[in-house]
Amino acid sequence: MTNPKTGYHRSLLETYFSDEYKIELVEIDGDNATADSSFALKPRDNPSVAAATIAPMYRTRFKYIVQFGRGTVSFRDAYKSNFNRVNGATPGQRRRIAERYSDFEERMRKVQAQMIFDAERK
Protein backbone atom coordinates (compact mmCIF):
# COMPACT_ATOMS: atom_id res chain seq x y z
CA MET A 1 0.00 0.00 0.00
CA THR A 2 1.32 3.43 -0.91
CA ASN A 3 1.84 5.94 1.88
CA PRO A 4 -0.60 8.88 1.53
CA LYS A 5 2.34 11.29 1.82
CA THR A 6 3.92 9.85 -1.32
CA GLY A 7 1.84 12.10 -3.60
CA TYR A 8 2.83 15.18 -1.60
CA HIS A 9 6.49 14.16 -1.69
CA ARG A 10 6.38 13.54 -5.44
CA SER A 11 4.77 16.95 -6.01
CA LEU A 12 7.57 18.64 -4.03
CA LEU A 13 10.20 16.90 -6.14
CA GLU A 14 8.37 17.74 -9.35
CA THR A 15 8.24 21.41 -8.32
CA TYR A 16 11.98 21.67 -7.72
CA PHE A 17 13.46 18.98 -9.99
CA SER A 18 11.22 18.00 -12.92
CA ASP A 19 12.84 20.54 -15.24
CA GLU A 20 16.12 18.57 -15.18
CA TYR A 21 15.39 15.21 -13.56
CA LYS A 22 13.27 12.11 -14.17
CA ILE A 23 11.55 11.15 -10.91
CA GLU A 24 10.50 7.60 -10.05
CA LEU A 25 9.20 6.01 -6.87
CA VAL A 26 11.51 3.26 -5.57
CA GLU A 27 10.91 0.36 -3.21
CA ILE A 28 11.94 0.85 0.41
CA ASP A 29 13.93 -1.98 1.97
CA GLY A 30 16.43 -2.77 4.70
CA ASP A 31 17.59 0.19 6.79
CA ASN A 32 15.48 2.53 4.67
CA ALA A 33 12.20 0.87 5.68
CA THR A 34 11.45 3.69 8.15
CA ALA A 35 11.18 6.24 5.33
CA ASP A 36 7.72 7.45 4.29
CA SER A 37 8.73 7.33 0.63
CA SER A 38 11.82 7.09 -1.54
CA PHE A 39 12.49 8.30 -5.06
CA ALA A 40 15.25 7.90 -7.60
CA LEU A 41 16.13 11.04 -9.56
CA LYS A 42 18.18 10.82 -12.75
CA PRO A 43 19.10 13.80 -14.92
CA ARG A 44 17.18 13.98 -18.17
CA ASP A 45 20.51 14.48 -19.96
CA ASN A 46 22.21 11.47 -18.32
CA PRO A 47 24.53 9.83 -20.85
CA SER A 48 24.02 6.17 -21.71
CA VAL A 49 26.05 3.58 -19.85
CA ALA A 50 28.01 2.96 -23.06
CA ALA A 51 28.82 6.65 -23.57
CA ALA A 52 29.90 7.07 -19.94
CA THR A 53 32.05 3.92 -20.20
CA ILE A 54 33.70 4.85 -23.49
CA ALA A 55 34.41 8.49 -22.58
CA PRO A 56 34.25 8.79 -18.78
CA MET A 57 36.43 11.88 -18.80
CA TYR A 58 33.70 13.71 -20.75
CA ARG A 59 30.49 11.94 -19.71
CA THR A 60 29.40 11.27 -16.12
CA ARG A 61 26.24 9.49 -15.03
CA PHE A 62 24.25 10.68 -12.03
CA LYS A 63 21.49 9.20 -9.90
CA TYR A 64 20.28 10.37 -6.51
CA ILE A 65 18.09 8.55 -4.00
CA VAL A 66 15.80 10.91 -2.07
CA GLN A 67 14.06 9.76 1.09
CA PHE A 68 11.29 11.43 3.04
CA GLY A 69 10.59 10.52 6.66
CA ARG A 70 9.40 12.12 9.88
CA GLY A 71 9.11 15.58 8.35
CA THR A 72 12.60 15.60 6.87
CA VAL A 73 14.16 14.82 3.53
CA SER A 74 17.59 13.38 2.81
CA PHE A 75 19.46 12.24 -0.27
CA ARG A 76 22.50 10.30 -1.36
CA ASP A 77 24.48 9.89 -4.55
CA ALA A 78 23.59 6.38 -5.74
CA TYR A 79 26.84 6.18 -7.73
CA LYS A 80 29.09 7.58 -5.00
CA SER A 81 30.99 4.32 -4.63
CA ASN A 82 31.25 3.46 -8.33
CA PHE A 83 34.68 2.91 -9.82
CA ASN A 84 35.11 6.32 -11.48
CA ARG A 85 34.05 8.24 -8.39
CA VAL A 86 36.40 6.25 -6.11
CA ASN A 87 39.41 5.39 -8.28
CA GLY A 88 40.97 8.21 -10.18
CA ALA A 89 38.21 10.40 -11.51
CA THR A 90 39.68 13.02 -13.80
CA PRO A 91 39.68 16.67 -12.71
CA GLY A 92 36.85 17.30 -15.19
CA GLN A 93 34.78 14.48 -13.72
CA ARG A 94 35.40 15.65 -10.17
CA ARG A 95 34.32 19.17 -11.16
CA ARG A 96 31.13 17.89 -12.86
CA ILE A 97 30.34 15.69 -9.86
CA ALA A 98 30.90 18.54 -7.38
CA GLU A 99 28.85 21.04 -9.43
CA ARG A 100 25.94 18.64 -9.91
CA TYR A 101 26.00 17.65 -6.23
CA SER A 102 26.07 21.29 -5.12
CA ASP A 103 23.10 22.16 -7.35
CA PHE A 104 21.18 19.11 -6.13
CA GLU A 105 21.95 19.96 -2.50
CA GLU A 106 20.66 23.52 -2.98
CA ARG A 107 17.42 22.25 -4.50
CA MET A 108 17.02 19.82 -1.60
CA ARG A 109 17.33 22.71 0.87
CA LYS A 110 14.42 24.35 -0.95
CA VAL A 111 12.37 21.14 -0.69
CA GLN A 112 13.04 20.98 3.07
CA ALA A 113 12.13 24.66 3.49
CA GLN A 114 8.88 24.09 1.58
CA MET A 115 8.04 21.12 3.82
CA ILE A 116 8.56 23.28 6.94
CA PHE A 117 6.46 26.08 5.47
CA ASP A 118 3.66 23.66 4.55
CA ALA A 119 3.72 22.05 8.03
CA GLU A 120 3.45 25.46 9.72
CA ARG A 121 0.42 26.38 7.62
CA LYS A 122 -1.55 23.35 8.85
Image (cartoon, rainbow, N blue to C red):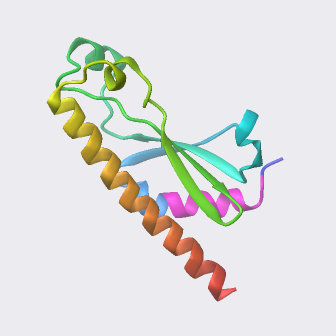
Q: Is residue 7 magenta?
A: yes
Q: Which of the 4 image quarters holds residue 5?
A: bottom right
Would residue 68 be found to the left or right of residue 22 on screen?
Answer: right
- Position of residue 111 measured from the top left corner of the image (x, y, whole percent): 49, 65
Q: Nearer the viewer, residue 7 or 62?
A: 62
**How many numbered circles are shown?**
0
**Residue 81 visible at all:** yes
Is residue 108 highlighted in magenta?
no
Figure check: 87 above or below 35: above
Q: Residue 23: x, y in percent?
A: 51, 46
Residue at left 37%, top 17%? 83
Q: Is residue 24 above or below residue 109?
A: above
Residue drawn at x 53%, y 64% as measured from the top left: 12
Residue at figure coordinates x 52%, y 67% from the top left: 112
Q: Which residues are magenta?
A: 3-13
- Position of 45 with respect to 112 (left or right) is left
Image quadrant in which the C terminus is located: bottom right
Q: Image quadrant of residue 50? A: top left
In this view, 62 is above or below 85? below
Q: Nearer the viewer, residue 3 or 78?
A: 78
- Please name the residue shown 44% across and 36% down the image: 63
15 left or right of 31 in image: left
> Does residue 28 appear in the picture of this structure?
no
* Residue 37: % across, % down: 68, 50
Q: Residue furthest right?
A: 1
Figure check: 120 above or below 47: below
User: Does the magenta stretch mainly form a helix, a strand or a loop?
Assistant: helix
The location of residue 101, given as percent across then percent down, is 34, 46
Could you say which is closer to the camera, residue 122 or residue 22? Answer: 122
Q: Residue furthest front?
A: 87
